[in-house]
Image (spheres, rainbow, N blue to C red):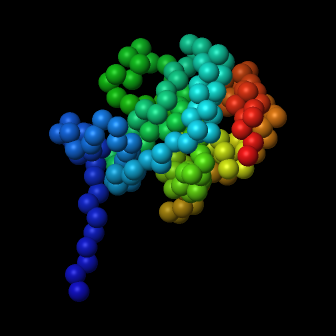
Amino acid sequence: MSLTTAKRFTIAEYHRLTELGFFEENDRVELIKGEIIQMAAKGTPHSVCETRLERELYKLVGDRATLRGQQPITLSNNSEPEPDRVIAKNRDDDYLANHPSPSDILLLIEIADSSLKYDQEEKLLIYAEAGISDYWIFNLVDNYLECYSEPYQMQVKFGYRRKFIYLPNESVNLPCLPDLSLDLSKIFSGMLF
């Protein structure tokens, strides 16, 4: 009996595949632990939440940090996810030299409906392992915001020590800019299913 193993890619190999035209222009893929993962298609609620969130974050954050949407971040030699939103430290080159790494990321945000379980389990673990201090999931299944903080490692297991739930009619302070408060009703309004 022969064993087969899947090919795991490094970020350099993944970038080379992109340069060679292996992916179509509209392919929605990301590299997670060496695997090329097809990203879930976005439904209307996801798109609306993303639009509203982007609008509110730009109003709040202004030029105090760099806002990025569905752009790569580098977590390790074999993970380059494209989260829905990232608030990163400002850099003079706007990340031209390289994508943000965990030390650059102030807040990482995913918007989840069909991808909820994946974002709560798989992505949560890789973000915790990378030391992302604050991870939010806009949970469109249960209609609330999940806020994770204080990543930990216990032997080979990674996770977050703290999880807070914010309801759609509440406000939450941005952990990276605690003087700024995001009114969740501006995001969730009319989206309760």
Q: Is residue 116 above or below residue 155?
A: above
Q: Is residue 49 left or right of residue 181?
A: left
Question: Exactly how many numbered labels are in the figure?
Answer: 0
Outermost residue, bottom direction? 1
Front position in the image: 13 or 22: 22
Q: Is residue 12 left or right of residue 123?
A: left
Residue at 52% from the left image edge and 36% from the top image edge? 84
Nearer to us in this view, 97 or 27: 27
State the quadrant of the N terminus: bottom left
The reply to whether residue 57 is in sight is no
Q: Is 169 placed above or below 36 here?
A: above
Task: Give the image location of residue 112, x and y in percent.
Answer: 59, 46
**Residue sticking out furthest to the right:** 169
How far across and how far down the image is residue 121, in percent?
56, 57
Q: Is residue 122 visible?
A: yes
Most distant residue in the left direction: 20
The answer to whether 132 is drawn above or below residue 175 in the figure is below
* Residue 72: percent from left, percent from top: 41, 35
Q: Quick check: 164 left or right of 12?
A: right
Could you tell me which residue is drawn at 41 percent across and 19 percent down? 94
> Residue 184 appears at what percent x and percent y?
74, 32
Q: Residue at x 40, y 39 (%)?
A: 74
Q: Residue at x 59, y 27 (%)?
A: 51
Q: Quadrant of residue 106?
A: top right
